[in-house]
Amino acid sequence: MTEVVLDRPVARTAPVLFALAVFTSASLVFVVQPMVAKLILPKLGGSAAVWNTSMVFFQAALLAGYAYAHALQRVRSLRAQVGVHLAALALAALFLPLRVSGVLGDPPPDAPIVWLLGVLALSVGAPFAVLSATAPLLQAWYARVRAGEPDAANPYVLYAASNLGSFLALLAYPVLLEPLLRLQSQTAVWTGGYLVFVVMMLGLAALAWRSRDAAVADEPLTRSEPIAWKRRLVWLLMAAAPSSLMLGVTSYLSTDVASAPFLWVVPLALYLLTFVIAFQAKPLISPGIALLAHALIVPVCVSWLPFNTTLPTLLQFVVHLSAFFATALVCHQALAARRPPADRLTEFYLWLSLGGVVGGAFTALVAPVVFDVVREYPLVLVLAALARSRAAGPLGRRDWILLAAAVAVCSIAPAMLALLKAHPALARFYEWKTGVMLGHALLLVAAVCAILVRGRPVLFTVVLAVMSMSAQGLAGQFNWIESKRSFFGVLRIARYDDVRYGPVHVLMHGSTMHGAEIVDPKNRCVPMLYYATTTPIGQAMLKVQNHKPAAVVGVVGLGTGTLATYKRAADSLTYYEIDPLVERFARDPNRFGFISRCAEGPVGVVLGDARLSLAHEPADKFDLLVIDAFSSDSVPVHLLTEEALRGYLRVLKPDGVVLLHLSNRNLEITTPAIAAARAVGAPAMLSAFKAKDKRSPMIEASTEALIVARSEEGLRAFQGDSRWWVPPATETRAWTDDYTNLIGAMWRDMKADAEDARKRAALQSR
């Protein structure tokens, strides 16, 4: 065989050129993911499922790229491979600049996944797949071009450079690109980066052409032994687990803890960082340390999973992301230890990519259909423990004793709850907090047992599974009545015992309440939470009705349909809702009866994205338009932009008002809304209501809202009310369809929380 040999000057620069090209291609591949997701999010309501489904598409496109790279490696001539890839890069450039394809029209409410995958394929599929193929191709070319050099046998170090580029690109997007550049500028910068990369590839092509004997290299490398199918299956499963977990932890944190789109890239960034570490020549974190960290953090995470509503948000993020990072690192280091020789490199990456698609598809496409809640995350978190390395020697008596002890202590809490359900009279001797504390203490004992059997992967996994089931049983004390899941998230109905009204049914979307109804028939039509008569939303409804004998009202965001309690026979009320499951819940009198029992006359519901639906409404239609669309605590930012506000004002009557509900636990979104009102030249007034009844939190909820009118005439009913005031000017930049800054919104919220804490401390010290 004739090897490819480089001239000395070229040989010295080759590693740098290859590393730079791999780094650049990976950066382009991964910065485009949040960018394209942001382009598409407005059409699908901003839910985390949009990101997860997009990730499955990108993983599938990555698989297509790796399959192309693997097929191209069968071409014996290096020059021919380079020529084909340059042609593919040129053809993919025809799809630039990046934009959302309009071929498929607007998304259908009943089939958002198919629409989303189709739009992604038409919009970004070609350039993404070709760029994805670059990393494995360049590594294979590196092994050939560097033949005879010490580093030729381990081109996998370039994989670390690839993932480092991906990691830095993901961090740069929310911190630099999103706050500083408009979306149109971002796509222009990406297009420029793509063209720069093509120039780099031309340079590498010239390098390959200058290589002595490159044209007659009939065989790429000496062929090693074929890979056994069992080994391929291990590759696939070990790649699938971290991919599934990445999307699982994203769904869990977005649904059950706190939701903000810029946080969705954090699990992906950590996922890539584990690849960087695992494939380093000298890993920053050794496999031994990774295994120990995994054994320490995962049992804690499994124990806490069902108790998301009782633990601090920051602590949950730290624990869950640490558990994910440790698990992904263990799996990826196990993959790195099982990587084949360089001549099998593209096949190895092909199986890794296939595993990524399998894991991602399970979480994003299969799990929402199979599970009513986010169960795929704890399931895969437990099963991934099988990737741990096994200690030498057979199982001993100590191992079996530890397993038996873990099973025994984990059985106590579920058994205790079963006894209470069988004998309700015993419940008066049982205190919930004491039961939870006892359950956590028992789970701590089981966690110690898990740590002690960490060298036995099967036993360690069994203990984790038992702990997970015990924790779920302990959390069964929460009064969940029903749980259903759709593409847009998990809806749950909970029972709450109010000191004033008795049993109350509450609709939960993730960790946020979206309406509550009193069970007692005498009071079931009393509006509660954000919709009580004392809140800004309730005030606006009453003021408009006082001036309009037949008010025309539109509401973006259905929830339980609480505002239907205000509807008079002469009024017109239309809801705009993106999730068909929410409409099913709100219209079913066995779940919530505001629409079916409390409203006077029919209530309309228009399914689909609200901005798209409102664009089809005639001008001068509404007396009041309420914007109250939230998925858990996620902010649909496209509903708060200048362009959105102009659309709302278009459908208002000359004296009508639009109310923006701006309450949020994690982001300060009031000042961007004020800035948007000023940008469009519309008068606005602000109200911040504080709930007063601490003993009965269902009666009313603290609410912040901004009303915006086409003219001062629309604000007259509010101007004499001390609960409403004209907001001061703000230096915050208005959000547009082309620009948002969620990092800034989070920072302002953190500063406000710190200031509130300082004031409370000052009052207590007096």
Image: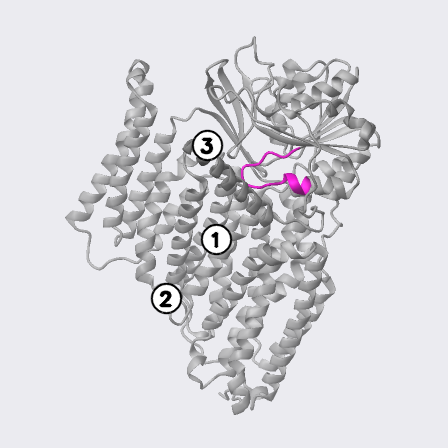
Label 3 crowd (10 A; few <14 / some 14-19 / many >=20): few
Task: Write down the residue under mark 2.
Answer: 337
Task: Write down the residue under mark 1.
Answer: 243
Q: Which of marks 1 and 3 precedes in the sequence?
A: 1
Image depth: mark 3 or mark 1 in front: 3
Q: Position of residue 346 (x, y in %)?
A: 50, 69
Which mark identifies residue 501?
none
Residue found at x 63% / y 27%: 583
- The answer to whether residue 354 is above or below residue 638 is below
Amino acid type of disc 1?
Ser
Q: Residue furthest top?
A: 522
Image depth: mark 2 or mark 3 in front: 3
Whether pointer 2 and pointer 1 mark residues with C-beta atoms closer than 8 Å, the reply is no
- The answer to whether residue 169 is above or below residue 37 is below
Q: Position of residue 737 (x, y in %)?
A: 72, 48
Residue found at x 56% / y 8%: 522
Disc 3 is placed on an element classified as helix
Residue found at x 79% / y 18%: 548
Amino acid type of disc 3?
Leu
Question: Left or right: where does residue 293 sit relative to residue 507?
Answer: left
Question: Left or right: where does residue 577 sit relative to residue 236?
Answer: right
* Quadrant containing the C terminus in the rendered view: top left
Q: Position of residue 323 (x, y in %)?
A: 39, 49
Which mark identifies residue 763?
3
Disc 3/disc 1 C-alpha distance (Å)? 49 Å
Magenta-span inclusion, residue 667: yes
Q: Which of marks 1 and 2 precedes in the sequence?
A: 1
Residues rendered magenta in the picture: 661-673
Picture quadrant of residue 107: top right
Q: Nearer the viewer, residue 383 or 223?
A: 383
